[in-house]
Image (spheres, coloured by chain):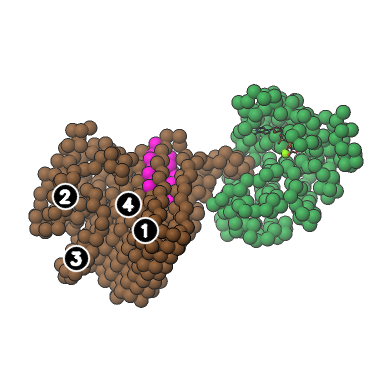
Amino acid sequence: MLLQIKNLKASIKNSDAEPILKGLNLEVNANEIHAIMGPNGSGKSTLSKVIAGHPDYEVLEGEILFNGKNLLDLEVTERANAGIFLGFQYPIEVPGVNNADFLRLAYNSKQVFEGKEELDPLDFNELLENKINMLNIPPYFIERSLNEGFSGGEKKRNEILQMAILEPILSILDEIDSGLDIDALKLVSESINKLLAPHKAVILITHYQRLLDYIKPTHVHIIYQGKIVKSGGAELALELEKNGYAGAVK
Amino acid sequence: MILQHKTWQENFTTYTSNLIEADEFRKQNWQSFLDKGFPSNSDEEWKYFNFEELFSQTINPFYAEKQTDLISESEKDQTSFVLPECEENQIILENGQIKSQKISNQQIIIASLDKAFSDYSELKIKYLNQAAKQDVFTLQNNSLWQGGLFFYMPANIVLNEPIQISLLSNSPHCANYSRNLIIIEDNCQAEIFIYCTGLNSSADELYLHNLINQIIIGENSQVKIFFVQNESKNAFQIAYTDIKLQNNSNLDFYNLSFGAKTSKHLIQADFLGKGIHHNLKGIYVLNNSQACHSQVTFNHNKPNCSSNQLFKGILSGNSKAEFSGIIKVKEGANGTSAKQLNKNLLLSPDAKIDTRPQLEIKADDVKCSHGATIGQLEDEEIFYLLSRGISKEKALEILTFGFAEEIIDTISIPSLRSFTEQLLTLNL
Ligand SMILES: Nc1ncnc2c1ncn2[C@@H]1O[C@H](COP(=O)(O)OP(=O)(O)OP(=O)(O)O)[C@@H](O)[C@H]1O
Ligand SMILES: [Mg+2]
């Protein structure tokens, strides 16, 4: 099993407020696509950040295993190098850090971690060019500072570019579809489909069926008040689209 | 403390030399210094300066006469850093005196300043006392400078290659004095890299480098000056740069500070004509207990000039920085546009910054802005980079770089850009 989350309880660090995640269970195998849906504020982004190791959150109880290893023992960097990728709901702007340089640094960090050779700028540029061609990304994306001044949709596409460069085993994409125009949604979905592989898995956090029209989930979960309250197949999302959350969570 | 101060001051005040006695100007200045004595923190300009640190060192007012054979061959290798672009155009001074010079454009005049002054007395009358600032360190320089640099670029010269001026200090436990008069006439184009460093920089030598630059830029000239302060980590540098700008001239001045235990650079620019544009960009990168004082005075005397100041500081350890800048827009200097911004990145809770951007406006139709920021690296930015598998150390480094990039990116000499990045990395 790729990812196993058992009875996960998490809250904001150093806060007396009640936990955001209140005993969440989830299992993801290789070659699966999981969609996680749920009302605003139900804890979807929190779950994704806890998996990635965001320092704002504290795990109170429970376990997260990745390939059988305890993920909670690992630093953020180590989790990423182990093959976990988080596509941010709100990607951060980093002025002064060139996107191409950043991508090369991220790529080479992984190479070093895996005991492989680092790529020099020339070789990396070749790889980068292939990826941006494959993803239909305009060249100015990599010339600019990381996400600086990018539109909402451009930021999301830049997340996919990072995913394509890093080739993670488990990708958690938090509302990758929000902010994308109709054409971009199609393009991004196609890109994600291209990056699928039998030894990999994807978790798509989304509010809308239209993303799932392009990327067909094997599993759909509904998260409500910090717990997964219902799981099913692709049909569950269609049902939600018709009846809203009211029917699903009662 | 008081005792140390006394000893220190006595070192200076008991100093007499033929040099001072031989010249009326030197004598007068030395007497003014003796009358004034050293300043203290109650002087506005020296409010944040750590005199305790300076006075706790033993520094003699003048380096012994033996000015020959100072460089042994091995030392020469480590310290004669030259930008590849400047191979054919470089002037090396040691303790303020020209050691060697090479220049491809034969119209440019390079000479020792005292020779230039003795050959052309009108030069001396016009420029020697022009540097208006009268603090004690200036008075000392006025009294004790020797050699000096006279750099004269006649009108209508366009240089395609930058010129490097290296100001090397080789005066262990002593003060040394640099005095550079740089005159660029009308319709010129030039890039000048001024590099200050200790000759024995690996030995972290203690010395005091007292430096005066007088820079005159003629009409319509386009000039870039890159001043890089990389003195030994135990040294003191007290610098004063006096800039005079004529009609429609354009000056980009970069003030890049990395070295010295304590450094102070006072930059004064006088806008003496119309249509002048002056960019002043500063970076100071400090760690351990380094201190850096940047003081800027812009005198907008004439109409329709613009200026833009951007100073960025990166402070680690228990370092301290001061930025105080004042823009004075004089009566009649209508249509002035002047901006001043000081941004600071504090990488350690023990680092300290005092920043005082100020405006003084006496003209109409003026666009001025000033401001200062002090901040840390953003946690969300750090997390974003870590989540891509980048190590914490590297993430902090590239975010810090990113902060300075706004200035470094605009350095027009490629090898100087990478040299600056190198100095930055070394000083984090
Ligand atoms: N760093 C934080 N500080 C304070 N509250 C937080 C923080 N992170 C999450 N929360 C709170 O936890 C709850 C869950 O937030 P989360 O972002 O996980 O929701 P979500 O399911 O992703 O919502 P949406 O669909 O709107 O993106 C919300 O009530 C939110 O306000
Ligand atoms: Mg969310």
Q: Chain of mark 1?
A: B
Instruction: Considering the whole magenta stretch, tell me its main secondary structure.
Output: strand
Q: Residue at x 58, y 54 (%)?
A: A145
Report if residue A151 lies within the magenta region: no
Q: Is mark 1 within 8 Å of ligand 1?
A: no
- Give the mark, 2 or 1, whose residue is nearer the N terminus: 2
> In the picture shown, does residue B225 fall above or below A112?
below
Find the distance from the CA under tag 4 to the CA under tag 3. Answer: 23 Å
From the image, tell me which residue sits under label 1.
B330
Q: Are marks 2 and 4 in contact (CB under 8 Å)?
A: no
- Give the mark, 3 or 1, whose residue is nearer the N terminus: 3
Q: Position of residue A25 (x, y in %)?
A: 77, 29
Q: Is B204 on the left or on the right of B355, as rendered?
A: left
Q: Is A22 on the left or on the right of B268, as rendered?
A: right
Find the distance from the CA under tag 3 to the CA under tag 2. Answer: 20 Å
Which residue is more in the foreground, B69 or B311?
B311
Q: Kindly indicate which chain is depicted in green in the rendered structure.
A: A
In the rendered structure, which amino acid carries the disc numbered 2?
Ser
> In the picture shown, does residue B275 fall above or below B374?
below
- Give the mark, 3 or 2, whose residue is nearer the N terminus: 2
Find the distance from the CA under tag 2 to the CA under tag 4. Answer: 20 Å
Q: Chain of mark 3?
A: B
Q: Residues within 10 Å of mark 4 (few under 14, many from 20)?
A: some
Residues shaded magenta: B310-324
From the image, tell me which residue sits under label 4.
B266
From the image, tell me which residue sits under label 3.
B124
Q: Nearer the viewer, mark 2 or mark 4?
A: 2
